[in-house]
Amino acid sequence: MTPLVYDDEMIRGVLSSVKTIAMVGASPKEQRPSYFVMRYLLGKGFRVIPVNPGQAGGSILGQACYADLAAIPEPVDMIDIFRSPDAVPGIVDAALALDPLPKVVWMQLGVRHEAAASKAEAAGLAVVMDRCPKIEYARLSGEIGWNGVNSRILSSKKPTLRSGFQSFGIRPPKG
C-alpha cells in the first residue's frame, strides 16, 4: 500500500477543533492500544466516549460505554476507529446517520478503507486513515521528542501549558 501523507496543518486543525471523540472498539484491557490511547486523550482534555457492544452499559476509564454510535446521547466531533478495515464501512454508515454529523472519521494505525473514506468525504467529513491521534498529538505538541523521537517539529517558542499531566497542547502553526 502507498503510504498516506497528511499535512501537519490538517492534522493540527482536526486535533484542535474536536472536543468529543467516540472511540469505536475501545477496550477495558490495560494492555490494549485503545485503552492507553483513550487514557492519553482523556488526560489531554478530550471527552472520549467508548463504543463497544460487549461493554455497553458499563464503563471504561470512568466513561459510560455504548453499544454503537446511535446509542450515544450527545453529539460527537470525531469517530476514532479501532476496528479492522472490514468493519469500517458499517461504522462510516452509522456515523453518517448521526444528527448532527461528526466532523471527522479517524482510522487508527493499520486501518484503511478507501471506499468508506470517499463516502465520508463526499458527505463533508474530514478523514484520516492509518494514523493515531495520540501519536499525532504528541508529535505536534513536541511531547514525543521527550523520548528522543524526531517529531519533525522544531521551535524555539516556549510551549503553552494546557490542563493535564505534562500537557503543552498542540503548538500553533508557524507565522
Image (cartoon, rainbow, N blue to C red):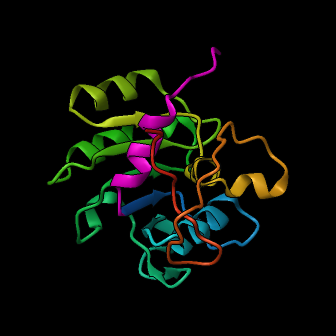
**Is residue 71 placed above or below 105 in the rendered structure?**
below
**Is residue 61 placed above or below 39 in the rendered structure?**
below
Q: Nearer the viewer, residue 162 or 105?
A: 162
Task: Please tell me which residue is depicted at 52% across the width and 65% down the height of the picture.
Answer: 160
Identify the image quadrant of residue 34: bottom right
Task: Please tell me which residue is depicted at 45% across the width and 49% down the height of the picture.
Answer: 172
Q: Position of residue 21 (x, y in %)?
A: 40, 60
Q: Nearer the viewer, residue 48 or 50?
A: 48
- Determine if the magenta segment contains residue 3: yes
The residue stretch that appears in magenta: 1-19
Q: Which residue, as the protein is rendered here, is positioned at the far top?
A: 2
Identify the image quadrant of residue 9: top left
Q: Nearer the viewer, residue 75 or 146?
A: 146
Identify the image quadrant of residue 89: top left
Q: Position of residue 151 (x, y in %)?
A: 70, 42
Q: Quadrant of the N terminus?
A: top right
Task: Please tell me which residue is depicted at 66% across the width and 53% down the height of the picture.
Answer: 142
Task: Please tell me which residue is depicted at 77% across the width and 40% down the height of the picture.
Answer: 150
Q: Which residue, as the protein is rendered here, is positioned at the far right?
A: 148
Q: Position of residue 88 (x, y in %)?
A: 45, 38
Q: Position of residue 71 (x, y in %)?
A: 28, 67
- Determine if the magenta segment contains residue 12: yes
**Is residue 145 placed above or below 127 in the rendered structure?**
below
Q: Quadrant of the C terminus?
A: top left
